[in-house]
Amino acid sequence: MNELVLRTIVDAQYAESILQAKAPGMKVISATQRHHPFAGFVFDVPQLAGRVGRTHTLVDYFSGKAFISGPWQAADPSDSIGFKPVLDPQWNTIDFDSARQKAKALLATAALRRARLAWKGGVREQRSVGKVWKPNWVLEAQLDGKSYRIMVDGLNGGYFFIGS
Amino acid sequence: MFGLPTFTTVVILGVPTLWIIYTVVFMWLSRGWKREDVEETP
Amino acid sequence: MSIEILFLIIYFIAMAGIGVWAMKKGQNDSEGFLLGGRSIGPGVTALRLQSSSMSGYMFMGAGSMGYTQGYFGMWYALGDLGGGILNLSVLGRRMRKLSQILGSITSIEYLEHRYPSKWIRLIAAPVALFCMFFYLLAQFIAGGRGLEMVTGVSFPVALAIAIGVIVLYTFLGGYLAVAYTDFVQAIIMVVGMVWVLIATLIAIGGFTKGNEAIGAINPNMLTMWGADLGYQGQWGVIIGALLVFSIGYMGWPHVVVSHMAMKKPSVARTAGAYSLIFNLLFIPGPYLVGMFALILLPNLANPETAIFEVADAVLPTFAVGIVMAAIMAAIMSTADALLLQAGTIASQDIYARFINKKMSDRQMVWVSRITVLVLAVIGFAIAAFEPPAVAAIVIFSTTVLGSAFVPAYVCAVWWKKANTVGAISSMVAGTLVSVLWTVSGAPYATGIDPMVTGILASTVAMIIGSLASQKTHPVPEHIVRALDETAKIGPIPAKMIMGQDAMLASQAEMAGRDE
């Protein structure tokens, strides 16, 4: 099964600055990179007026949630020093074939929503990647004497609280 | 008021007022919860 | 050709032209094309709640309610005012997060993920389709009546044209959507409605004068009890009228689906406030215009056309064209949204789930197209020969949807013990009780609205069903975990809670669990 590790766009310092921009005074104590596994598919999706668009999708193995992503940029081999996958929680996990179905269903629904019934269908798979590892940051941070764990998306800098 | 019976006036002004209060309380509560969250942090 | 039709045609050609131009001109950006609806902001979320299914009812049903029952109709409007904020405050945030963690695309698939059993979809999808058909019928009739008035052709012909245009619209809507979004539709609806309302108030000499004139015709119209005081003290009916469009909203599969597309929790909050403002501006209008039509046009053959006729009477000619074009546009895009949702339910939730698990996207399109055509033909057959009252069918289907789905959607996120048995009993009990109660004439005999009995039945069924089967059918472990995560996420600094990216919910959980 082929694998791809995505390049980290948001580095640890940038991740820290994103949080500090929202909450000045937040102190980041540690930043660990964790990689989350997705099934990756590239499709050619017909649009209106005879145009075809190339679309990258990622399907989260651990939740089954499908996303439309931007084009992928592979990490340099030298980057993989910090590679640390998250563990499979074993409770909502899907396999590669269901991931493919999910990705297709997402694209078909999205295309139909946009193009209405003028859409002809005909999504073609161009490429698939068994495991696309997406980098995320887990930050231990402190604010006003309380500690938090926050995840920062390594690609777009979005954040989400894990706990405290 | 407005040439309407009192009860009608009370209802057509009162119920929207209740909804406005509900909205304001919801906006205020969804703010208040967060403050509580922070204070409970160990 | 009348000026109204000219406006109607110019309007649509302009919209389609902009769409085709934008489509040819734009870069080859597939993501932008597909993500059109993904990062939905508070304005669109709020307005979509109201505009995505109500045009036909608002322009016909509400007007006729005002014309025939006076201020009694306001009970429905008063409930409706809070529908958006109630929906967003109760379901918005949690449903968004849970659907992310469970990976659901459609709102019915989401129910099946939360209450794992194929019976959930087998029951929910047909009930949803059945009820949405009535909303659709309301749009067809409204479109037909509007065209009948503007062109003067007979109703069946106008209806056929209207349905034809609506179906055509579902094919061309993708081009239109570039320029003509839900947001624009909602704004046009408000402007059109407020315009008609103001012109009406001017024509009758102001609000107080209008009420006095209504009082001179029939003083009962000014009470909250109906034209013949028939609803005086009938609190069972009145509570039902208040509940239908407030609580009932939370059971609409085609409305709650927009919660799943919201990008941030802050959207739910702001959207709640917006929806209240929009509703205060828009909702009372049609009921009032319908009522004041009694002064301006005391001898209407069909009270449902009150708003169209009033617009024709009080607006200057050019404005009639613009407002009618706006109303027709709203009706069409509402019908288009409903047809597309119905097509999605038929293809994703029925065909792909039960008939052909390996459905290709081409098959999906064809199932959707056939569904749309079948619904259009059945709709024409029913509406052309004996058009039902728009208000009655919309209130009926909202009652059934509300009774069937409100406990299922609400308990899905608020009650951990809600399980599959509870959800199935609740949907079945809600549907059966609300339908049988209506059909058997019980509302007249008992004075209790089917919305009250229906939602009571489905709530009780949910509670008893879930509690009685906790041992035999416990909520599966992965759902319990997902629910824990929906509620948990620990305390978060106030200034940061709004900026969180919900798309990361499940990844964050995994990243944090094994250290």
Image (cartoon, rainbow, N blue to C red):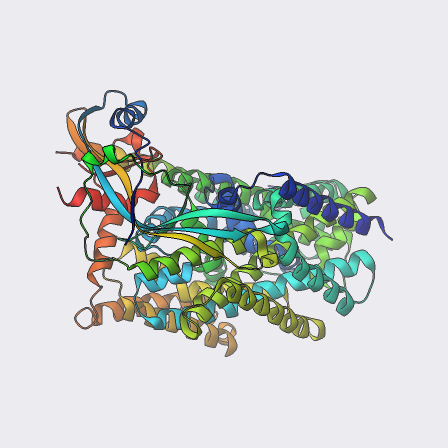
From the top left corner, tell me how far across and down residue B1 is, in percent: 59, 41
C48, above or below A91, in the image: above
Above or below for A92 versus C278? below
Tell me the quarter of the image containing the C terminus of chain B: top left
Which residue is situated farthest in the top direction here? A25
Task: Please say if C459 is above or below C101.
Answer: below
Query: C251 or A31: which is nearer to us?
Result: A31
Residue at image x 77%, y 51%? C296
Q: Nearer the viewer, residue C114 or C192?
A: C114
Residue C291 position in % (x across, y down): 67, 53
Give residue A157's position: percent from left, percent from top: 33, 32
Residue C149 is at least partly visible in this image: yes
Q: How many marks?
A: 0
Residue nearest the viewer, comparing C343 with C131: C343
Q: Residue at x 25, y 32 (%)?
A: B35
In the image, A156 versus C418, the foreground residue is: A156
Left or right: residue C460 compared with residue C311: left
Q: Quadrant of residue C426?
A: bottom left
Which residue occupies 32% across, 23% down?
A21
Q: Is residue C55 left or right of residue C297?
A: left
Residue shown at 45% from the left, 44% from the top: B19
Q: Going by the image, does A86 lie left or right of C133?
A: left
Which residue is most to the right?
C1
Write down the quadrant of residue A86 in the picture. Answer: top left
Residue C258 placed where, x, y %? 45, 50
Task: Answer yes or no: is residue B36 visible.
Answer: no
